[in-house]
Amino acid sequence: MKPRADAKYVIGVDLGGTNVRAGVVDRNEKIIGQDKQPSDAKAGTDVVVDRIADTIQKAIDKANQHPEDIAAIGMAVPGQHDVANGVVRWAPNFGAMVDDKFQMWHNVPLRKRLEDRLSIAVVFDNDANVAALGEFRYGAGRKVQTMVMFTLGTGIGGGIIINGKVVQGTTGGGGEIGHMVIMPGGRRCGCGTYGCLEAMTARDAISDRAARKLSEGRPSLLWELVKGDKLALTPAIIDQAARANDPIAIETFQETGYYLGIGVANLINLINPEMVVIGGGIAAATGLLEATERSARANSIRSIAEACTIVRAELEDEAGIMGAAELASQYAAAG
Ligand SMILES: [Zn+2]
């Protein structure tokens, strides 16, 4: 289905494991109507497609518009996708129980399913690429042309934007910067290899790092905060201790920043970006961004790094919808 290039509005959809949000966005980049519903990610494809379609329809209603007024729908969808054909290759957080076993989405023709329902052109990309696009167009990166975004959380998401375009790669798998190996033989990663940036710096890596330091028997406020249970450590709790100047907590974020900075340095050398944006809740942890920047500059070629600023992301909740709206606008403009 072709986008309606002359229509006044686009829709951005942020599909998450918990909720799906949709916003109708006008040419002045304002959200004029939005809706949010549970995504029921584990209830099977039909239910999720229903949820997405209904959320979009309600957002259109709330904006007092009609489907014919919408140029295209852009979506942020977790997982790996065949972007050109609108097929979800796999999405680990979406699926259903089949014979007592959880089966994740695999080769779901999401574009066709939604276009058949809504009669509006649909384009989607993975959530990390879309967040990078949102940050590029409306957030920290709005004055640059080439940037890299790292999103810190359960995993390390990434998006590379070169001259205004997200790098998709040959099969839509481009920009998986969380899976650069930065320490051969390091922690095992969810992707099956060892020592990926994600395995060394995402949520569980941070918690394990602090737990190992506690195992050395050093005194720490963390013991009190988790009531003696090291398995209860989270980056948020470690940050609470870091703000109270707890040495183990501070070291944990310093070391995490050191490894993250190696990943940033590699991207700086490869891409020569004007800006590196660090997003996700963990990015605010005490001293983490500073440690990351120190390591990034120490481990990259100076003249290239000098052209690059390293900043925190500006958009938080809106990054998904606004990035998806930008994806829809680019799709509509390309016809
Ligand atoms: Zn990996």
Image (tube, rainbow, N blue to C red):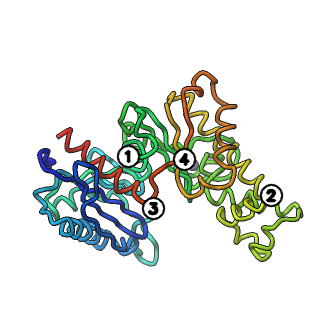
Sequence-earlier tag: 4 or 2: 2
Q: Residue 47: percent from the left, percent from the top?
A: 29, 73
Numbered marks: total? 4
- Label 4, on which residue? 312
Amino acid tagged 3: Pro
Where does label 1 land, which residue?
A: 138
Q: Amino acid at mark 1?
A: Tyr
Amino acid type, mark 4 = Arg
Q: Nearer the viewer, mark 1 or mark 3?
A: 1
**Left or right of 133 on screen, residue 62:** left
Query: How far is disc 4 from disc 2 in space, using C-alphas?
Result: 24 Å
Pick the front one: 55 or 108: 55
Name the residue carrying label 2: 248
Residue at 15 percent across and 51 percent down: it is 8
Q: Nearer the viewer, mark 4 or mark 3?
A: 4
Q: Amino acid at mark 2?
A: Ile
- Identify the residue position indicated by label 3 in the image: 92
Task: Tell which circle, 4 or 3, labels the residue nearer the N-terminal end.
Answer: 3
State the CA–CA distance, disc 1 to disc 2: 37 Å
